[in-house]
Amino acid sequence: MKKKVLKISFQGALGSYSHQASTKFFKDPVVVPCESFEEAIEAVRKGRADKAILPVDNSTYGRVADIHSLLPASKLFITAEYFLPVDICMLGPKSSNLKTVTTATSHPVLLGQCKEFLKKNNIKPISGYDTAGSARLISEENDKFKGALASKIAAQIYGLKILRANVQDNKNNTTRFLLMEKKPKKLIKQQKKVITSILFQVRNIPAALYKAMGGFATNNVNMIKLESYMLGGSFEATQFFADIQGHPDDMSVKRALDELKYFTNKLEIIGVYKQSNFREKHS
């Protein structure tokens, strides 16, 4: 029987860090590059891809705002997390070197993570749409005065020279990715080191959020992430995204969620997945 090929969608061109993460997490996937996060999510919903790999947080830059705003409406389910150490490389055409390059093009997030390196080498940052796209542009222009900040895999794909690797200011720079797909028929079994991701809207009553959070404390459930979103342009209607440690079938989690329901208009579980070993190694 022929083995099914796994198709993974991501935002960005070939050679992006999302591309790199997909090849690190999966063995020989068929990659589906997309122009936007919305398109990467839609590829899974429409069946053009089996899973989407999406960056949500960076240890230096913080949360990826675009993704966090899309999570609530994605209609996909989180089934895994992956942490990618980000090695940012200064790339240039074969004819270039660090002395010839005067500009570096990349996504604004990467430019912000390499401020010290760029200043030290008197290289002007130029904002680009994404990292791999910037590398492709520099390859096409083939100008020894122009470089790009991108990944090693982008250098290989677009025939660029790595002028210097690891140019990020924070050498522990890491991005957290979520793997999202259509909701499985069965959740993973109860086990240790599980993360449950939830969406909820608090009722418009005094101290609702404070009271809602109380259930996690009294039931000894650890909340490791909490993000808020404004709804419909209102400053009063707020939705929250949270990651908690534990499986929905754990009694402590059940009791905490039951208490949360009392103070919310909406509560939805949008992910149940094993905690990455990276957390334990870098805690």
Image (spheres, helix red, strand yellow):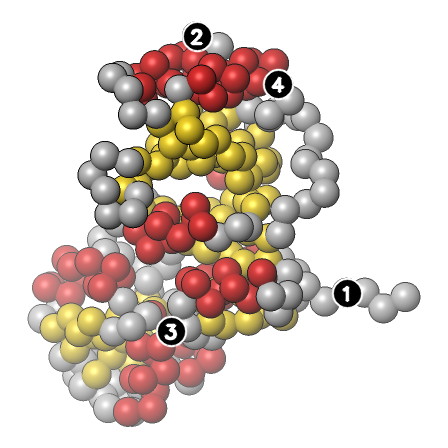
N-terminal-most mark, 2 or 3 = 3
Residue 218's mark?
A: 2
Q: Can you give x and y, in whole percent of width and height, for residue 80 in the image?
A: 57, 44
Q: Specify the label residue 57 is tagged with.
A: none
Q: Where is the N terminus found, in terms of image quarters? A: bottom right
Check disc 3 and report its element: helix, strand or loop.
helix
Residue at the spot of label 3:
132
Q: Which residue is mark 1?
A: 4
User: Residue at point 31% right, 43% down?
Assistant: 231
Q: Amino acid at mark 3?
A: Ala
Towards the viewer: 24 or 101: 24
Mark 2 Cα shell of 10 Å, populated few (<14), some (14-19), many (≥20): few
Residue 28's image quarter?
A: bottom right
Residue 169 in picture, x, y percent from top left: 22, 53
- Front tag of 3 and 1: 1
SS at circle 4: loop
Q: CA distance from mark 3 to mark 1?
A: 28 Å
Residue at numbered disc 4: 250
Q: Are marks 2 and 1 in contact (CB under 8 Å)?
A: no
Real-space CA distance between mark 4 and mark 2, rounded to the nearest whole angstrom: 15 Å
Q: Earlier in the sequence, mark 3 or mark 4?
A: 3
Distance Cα–Cα, label 2 vs label 3: 47 Å
Is disc 3 surrounded by few (<14), some (14 to 19) or many (20+) residues within 10 Å? many
Residue sitting at 63 percent across and 46 percent down?
Answer: 183
From the viewer's perspective, is the residue at label 4 or at label 1 nearer? 4
